[in-house]
Amino acid sequence: MLLRDGMQAVTFERVATEAGASKTTLYKWWPSPGALAAEAYFAHSQRVLDFPDTGDLRADLITQLGAFVRWLKDEGAEQPVSELIGIAQTDPDVAHAWSESYALPRRELARQRLRIAQQQGQLRQDADLDVIVDQLWGACYHRLLVLKVPFDESITERLVTQALYGAASPDL
Amino acid sequence: MLLRDGMQAVTFERVATEAGASKTTLYKWWPSPGALAAEAYFAHSQRVLDFPDTGDLRADLITQLGAFVRWLKDEGAEQPVSELIGIAQTDPDVAHAWSESYALPRRELARQRLRIAQQQGQLRQDADLDVIVDQLWGACYHRLLVLKVPFDESITERLVTQALYGAASPDL
Amino acid sequence: MLLRDGMQAVTFERVATEAGASKTTLYKWWPSPGALAAEAYFAHSQRVLDFPDTGDLRADLITQLGAFVRWLKDEGAEQPVSELIGIAQTDPDVAHAWSESYALPRRELARQRLRIAQQQGQLRQDADLDVIVDQLWGACYHRLLVLKVPFDESITERLVTQALYGAASPDL
Amino acid sequence: MLLRDGMQAVTFERVATEAGASKTTLYKWWPSPGALAAEAYFAHSQRVLDFPDTGDLRADLITQLGAFVRWLKDEGAEQPVSELIGIAQTDPDVAHAWSESYALPRRELARQRLRIAQQQGQLRQDADLDVIVDQLWGACYHRLLVLKVPFDESITERLVTQALYGAASPDL
DNA sequence: TGTTAATCGAGACGGTACGTCCCGTCTTCTC
DNA sequence: GAGAAGACGGGACGTACCGTCTCGATTAACA
C-alpha cells in the first residue's frame, strides 16, 4: 500500500478494510499509521547490512554508498524512504522506529568499518568517524530530502574521495 | 501558530478562525496549509544571507555553518524547519516553496563563495563544489532529520576541517 | 428505516450512508440518532388531531381512544412508538421531542374536550381532568409498555365506561 | 452501577472489570447487559408485595398505590425503573425479565384483592378488574414514562376515587 | 496422591457506531 | 464584487462495546 499509493494512503481505516483486521487491533499494535508503515517497510525491505571489508577503505565505502544510492534510485526506495523520514519529523513514534530499526544500526556498521581503517592507520587518529558518516550518507539525504535535486550512483566516488582526501588544494 | 503548536495545528480551519479570515480566501492564496506555514515561516525568519568573504575560506565556512547551527539550535528553528522539510516530503507545494525560497538560494550563495576560493587556488580544480555543500550542510541535516541525534555548534569546525583536508591519513 | 428495521438500525452512520449525507450534517441538526428518528416519525405520521365534539362525551372518548388503539395496532405504530418511548427513558433529547411534539399536545386536546364536558355538567366539578386522561390513555400505554400484553380496540369501551361511571358497586 | 451511573453504564465490559469476572462468564448467565441489570435490580429491591386487606378496598388501594409512588419518588426507583422499562422496549430479554419478575406478579396480586372486593359486592359484577389495575398503576406509569411530568403521592387518592366512583356527574 | 476435566480469568479479535476534526467545494449575505 | 460566514459530502481519527474465540491457571472429581 505504501509503495502503491504512498504514505497518504496508509490509514488505519484503509489498512483495516484491506487486511480484514479491525481498527482496534491495529491501534493495539501500532501507535499511528506511520509507525505501522515504517514497520511494514522495514520488514519488507530487510537486506544484508554487511559492510564489506576488502582492506581497501575507499573501495569499500564506494561499494556500500553505491548500494545505498542504487537502493534509493533503482529499487524504488526513494519515495517511501522520503515519506517515512518526512512523517518522522512530526510523529515521534515513526521517528523512534526509524532511528532504532534503521538509521542508527546502519551508522554503527559504518562506524565499525571506519574504526578498523583508523586502527590500520588509513584514517587520521583525530578523524571524527561520525562526521565521515554524516558527510557520506548525509550528503545523499541532503539532496534527497532538502534540496530535492536528482542524483545517482556517480556521485559516490566524488563523495568518498573528497571525504577522504579533502577538497582543499594540496598546495596549502 | 507554527511555533506555538507545531505544524499539526496549522490547518486552514484554525487559521481562518484565528485570523478572522474565511477558508475561501485562504484557498485562494495558498494551495495547502503546509504551503501557508512555509511562507509564513520564511517571512517571519527572513535574515541576511550574506556569505562572509574574509579571504580565509575555512574561517568563513565555520562562521556561516556555525550561524546555521545556532539558528537551528538556539533560535528555535529546529522544530519548524524539521516539520516543514517533513511535510515537504509529502506535499509538493511545500517542497517547491522550500526549495525555491530557501534551500537552493542558500546553496547558490555557498557555491559562489566556494567558486571564488577555487579560483584563488584554495580548492582543488577538480573539487565538486556542490559536494562540499552537501558534506557541510547535509551533515547537519543528517543529524537533524535522519539520525535525530543532538549536535551543536562545536561540530562545525570538525565538519569544515574534514571536508577541506580529508579524513584519510596523510601518510598514504 | 425505523419502520423497516427498528430503532436499533437508526444510527447516524447508516442514515448518512443511505441518505447521501455526512455525519457532520446529521450532528448539526439532531443531537442523537433517537432524536432524528423521533422527528422523522412525527413528520411521517402526522395526522389530524381534532378531537370530536358531538356533545356525547362518552361516544367521543370511545371514538378518539379507539382511533389511538387502531393507530397502534392496525397501522404499525406499535413498534416504533414503543421503541421511541423506550429510548426516551434514556435519551433526554428524544424525551423532549416526544413530550413537546406528541404527548403534551395530545393531552391538551383531550383536556379541552373534557373541560367543555365539565362545564356542561357532564363531569363532576371536582373531577381531575388530567387523571381522566391518565386513566384512559395511560391504561393503554400500561399494557403496551409495561405489561406487554396484547389488547385491541375492544378495550376502549370498558375503559371509558369505568373511567366515567367508576368500578364501584352503585349500591355503596 | 445502575443506580450510580444509569443503565448506559451497565455494559458487560465494565461489569466484568469492576466485578473481576470475565465477559465469557457474564454471557453464560445473561443474554444482554440489560437483562443483567434487570435481574440485579430485582434482587436488590426485593420487597414485600403483600397487598393489604383491611376490608376497605378504597383505603387498601390508596395504601398500595401510595407505596408504589413513594417507592418511585422517594426511594430512587424512578430512574432505574424508567430505564429498565425503556430498554425493555428494545431488548426482549429485559422485557421478559421485567414482565415475569415484576409487572405480571404485581398485577396478579392487585387482581386478587380486587376479586375479593368484587365477591364482597364492593365492585360491580361486570367491572373489568384488569382495567382497574391499568387505570391505577397505568396512570402513574403514564406520567412517568410518557408525559414525563412530575407527580407525587397526592395523586393516589384522586386516582382511586375516580377509578371507583367515576368522573361523570352523578346527575346523569 | 496424581491425573484429568471442567471452570473461569484474562484478553485478543473482527466488527460497528460513536462523536470530532479537517478537507475542499459550494452558497449566501454583507460591506 | 470581494470576502466573512458557514453548510455540506467525504473521510480519517481514536474510543467504546459487542459477541466470539482462544489461552492458561485454578480447582474438583476421579483414578
Image: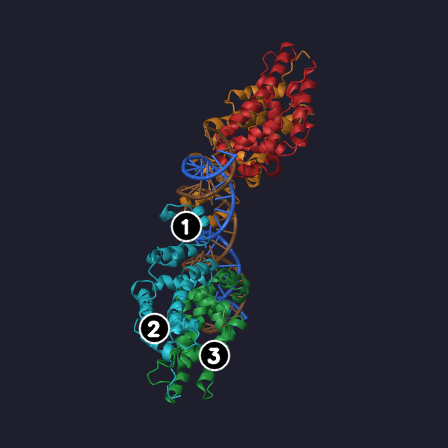
Chain colours: A orange, B red, C cyan, D green, E blue, F brown
Residue at x 58% of width, y 30% of height: B40
Single out the mark in the foreground, 3 or 2: 2
Q: CA distance from mark 3 to mark 2?
A: 24 Å
In this picture, is C76 found above or below C120?
above
In the image, E17 versus C115, the foreground residue is C115
Circle 1 chain: C
Q: Residue A160: tell me if it is visible.
A: no
In the image, D95 versus D132, the foreground residue is D132
Q: Which residue is mark 2?
A: C57
Circle 2 chain: C
Tell me whether the residue at label 1 lies in contact with that at label 3, contact meaning CB atoms closer than 8 angstroms.
Answer: no
Mark closest to the chain's N terminus, 1 or 2: 1
Q: What amino acid type should be assigned to the residue bearing mark 3? A: Glu
Q: Which residue is mark 3?
A: D157
Query: How far from the left and from the top, in percent, is residue D93?
Result: 40, 67
Q: CA distance from mark 1 to mark 3?
A: 49 Å
In this picture, is D78 found above or below B32?
below
Q: Residue B63: tell me if it is visible.
A: yes
Q: Which residue is mark 1?
A: C13
> Quadrant location of residue D169?
bottom left
* CA neighbours of label 2 inside 10 A, class few (<14), some (14 to 19), many (20+): many
Same chain for the residues under marks 1 and 3 in the image:
no
Q: What amino acid type should be assigned to the residue bearing mark 2? A: Leu
- Tag 1, which secondary structure? helix
